[in-house]
Amino acid sequence: MTKRQIKSYVRRWQELLRLEEWDIRVKTVEADHIAEDIDGEGLDGTASIDATQGAMNADITLATKLSDEDIAESIRHELLHLALANLTAFTRRIVAQLGTEAQAICANEGGMLEERTVIRLERMVNSLILEQKELKTDGKATS
C-alpha cells in the first residue's frame, strides 16, 4: 500500500469504528515488524498506537514491508485498540490508586487482557468483512 492508500484506509476505518473525534497520524517504517515478541508468545508487532486521551491524538507506527492485507489488518487492529481507549484510560486511573505490587500485576495482566479483547474484536470484524464479501459474490452470481 502506498502512504496515500494507508491514510485513506485509516480514515475509512476511523469512520466505520466511529472514531472521528480522534486526530490520527500515521508514521510508516520500511520494515516487516516494529517490535519483537510483543505478546510473550513469539509474535512480532507490525504496528503500534500511542494515544493521548485528553488531546484526542493518536499516532500509529506501521511496518510497510508487508502484504496489503497484512497492512490493512494491522491498521484495523490498532484502531480497535483506540476504540477501547476510554476503558483503558479508566482502568489505568484505577490501577494507579493501588499499591506498587498490585500495579505491577495489573499492568501485565491488563495489557494482555486488552490485547486478547482486541484480537477477539478483530476476529469479529474479519468475520463481518468475509461475510460482506460473500454476500457481494453471491449477489453477482445471482444477477
Image: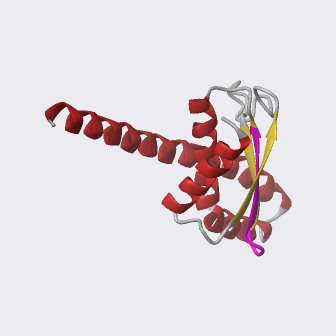
Instruction: Using the image, determine if residue 39 lies above or below residue 25.
Output: above
What is the quadrant of the N terminus in the image? top right
Left or right: 129, with 34 as reference point = left
Towards the viewer: 90 or 34: 34
Please tell me in which quadrant of the rendered image residue 32 appears: top right
Please tell me in which quadrant of the rendered image residue 97 appears: bottom right
Please tell me in which quadrant of the rendered image residue 38 appears: top right
Left or right: 121, with 71 as reference point = left
Q: Which residue is drawn at 70% across and 35% down?
A: 39
What is the quadrant of the C terminus in the image? top left
Instruction: Using the image, determine if residue 36 lies above or below residue 115.
Output: above
Inspect this view and state whether residue 73 appears.
yes
Q: Which residue is drawn at 82% across and 30% down?
A: 30
Task: Give how far across and how far down residue 92 sits, in percent.
Answer: 73, 65
Task: Give how far across and how far down residue 44 sits, in percent.
Answer: 73, 28
- The span picked out in magenta is 53-62
Task: Give how far across and how far down residue 102 sits, in percent.
Answer: 76, 57
Q: Does the magenta stretch include residue 88?
A: no
Instruction: Using the image, determine if residue 90 lies above or below residue 103.
Output: below
Task: Give how far across and how far down residue 126 sits, in percent.
Answer: 44, 40
Q: Which residue is drawn at 26% across and 40% down?
A: 135
